[in-house]
Amino acid sequence: MHDAKVSAKGLRIYEPELETSPRRVTLVAELRAALNNGEIAVHVQPKAGLADGTVTGAEALVRWEHPELGRVSPDEFIPVAERSGLIGPLTTRVLDLSLAAVAGWRSAGHDLGIAVNLSTRSLHDADLVDEVARLLRRHDVPADRLTLEVTEGSVMADPARAVALLHQLRDLGVRLSVDDFGTGYSSLSYLKRLPVQEVKIDRSFVTGLTEDGEDVAIVRTIVDLGRHLGLQVVAEGVEERSTWELLASMGCDLAQGWYLGRPMPIGELVPWLRTRERAEGRGGLRVV
Ligand code: C2E
Ligand code: MG
Ligand code: MG
Ligand code: MG
């Protein structure tokens, strides 16, 4: 089967190798197996308030450690999962591991939230709402500790359907976030119609922020827009202290990125928090 893809510029690109490349065929078969043999894990990357550095939660980032291929990037295998019908089981696995993590942190005395990414297909999956409700109950996690991140592009693939599903998720009490904000092509007013509580500024505007006046203008505009719409604004891809300080001065709410912490295995988050608390006690807090 031939495959055509719509590029960022809206041109249709012919990609004959996409469906049939040996690597893709391998990945589909191996991903199916990986879902049953524990090769799929979740790493978590902390998120903190820009004003005082308080860690409020983390984003769950799926990881696939293949015995021969090595680590396969989610940017490569999520599209494969989407096209092969494996995205449902994969999303369920990520939600299950993520909510188990939240339950574990709670019993260790850390009340933290978790953000899980949803792909386009998941936004068209009528079973998703029941799955989320079931997993929240199973792990006894309050719904508002879970944030689901969607991209503008995934909503726009079928807006009516996606918006209806987002309302159902919202009715469960789950928080909703627009990921990679600023990279899409639709008008800003669509934000008003989505039942979201948060926007995440795409890291392409954030990482080199202090060296790029245009990025500063874009980020400032998103922060102001978020404030006026009553949304929490998160900057992703904060790699340097100077970026952190500039974002804080703009009134951006939260930051995520290497400057605060890299994605880490779930079991490392509480020790990481304790190390930070000890450093803070000695007056040596690295961030802020
Ligand atoms: P995303 O949701 O925008 O996640 C942020 C990406 O930026 C992650 O890449 C993260 O490791 C990376 N990152 C974080 N801080 C920094 C930084 O300071 N500098 C730089 N240069 N990069 C940073 P990752 O883990 O490779 O994930 C890539 C994308 O794959 C994610 O982008 C998300 O769209 C998708 N993804 C990851 N996990 C899942 C999942 O469980 N389900 C779905 N559907 N998609 C997922
Ligand atoms: Mg995300
Ligand atoms: Mg993002
Ligand atoms: Mg991204």
Image: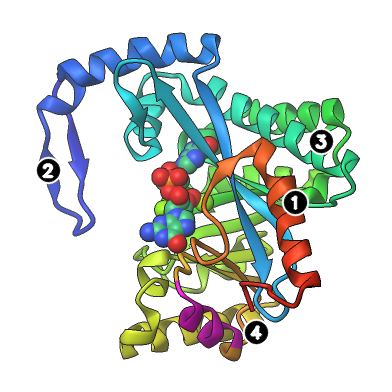
Which residue does the image show at 61% across and 24% down from the upper left? Answer: 93
- What residue is rendered at 77% in x and 63% in y? 278
Residue 115 % position (x, y): 64, 48
Q: Is residue 103 above or below residue 286?
A: above
Which residue, given by chain and number where applicable, does mark 1 sit on?
Answer: 113
Q: Is any part of residue 119 visible from this angle?
A: no
Most common secondary structure along the magenta stretch:
helix
Residue placed under numbered mark 2 in the picture: 13
Q: Amino acid at mark 3?
A: Gly
- Indicate the secondary structure of the residue bearing disc 1: strand
Question: What residue would you read off at disc 3?
Answer: 104
Q: Nearer the viewer, residue 278 or 76?
A: 278
Amino acid on which the number 1 mark rests in the picture: Gly
Label 2 amino acid? Ile
Which numbered disc, 4 or 3, marks the residue that appears first in the sequence?
3
Horizontal and vertical percent for residue 109? 90, 48
Between disc 1 and disc 2, whose residue precedes?
Answer: 2
Q: Is residue 286 magenta?
A: no
For the N terminus, which image quadrant? top left
Q: Which residues are magenta?
A: 240-248
Measure the C-alpha gap from mark 4 to mark 1: 24 Å
SS for tag 2? strand
Viewer-side label of 4, 3: 3
CA–CA distance in space, label 2 to label 4 = 39 Å
Tag shown at residue 135: none
Cα–Cα gap, marks 1 and 2: 39 Å
- Asked if the residue at tag 4 contacts the one at tag 2, i.e. Cβ–Cβ closer than 8 Å, the answer is no
Note whether ligand 2 is within 8 Å of mark 1: no
Of the pair 152 and 17, the residue shown nearer to us: 17
Residue position for label 4: 228
Q: Which one is nearer the viewer's eye here, 251 or 2?
A: 251
Q: Are marks 2 and 3 in contact (CB under 8 Å)?
A: no
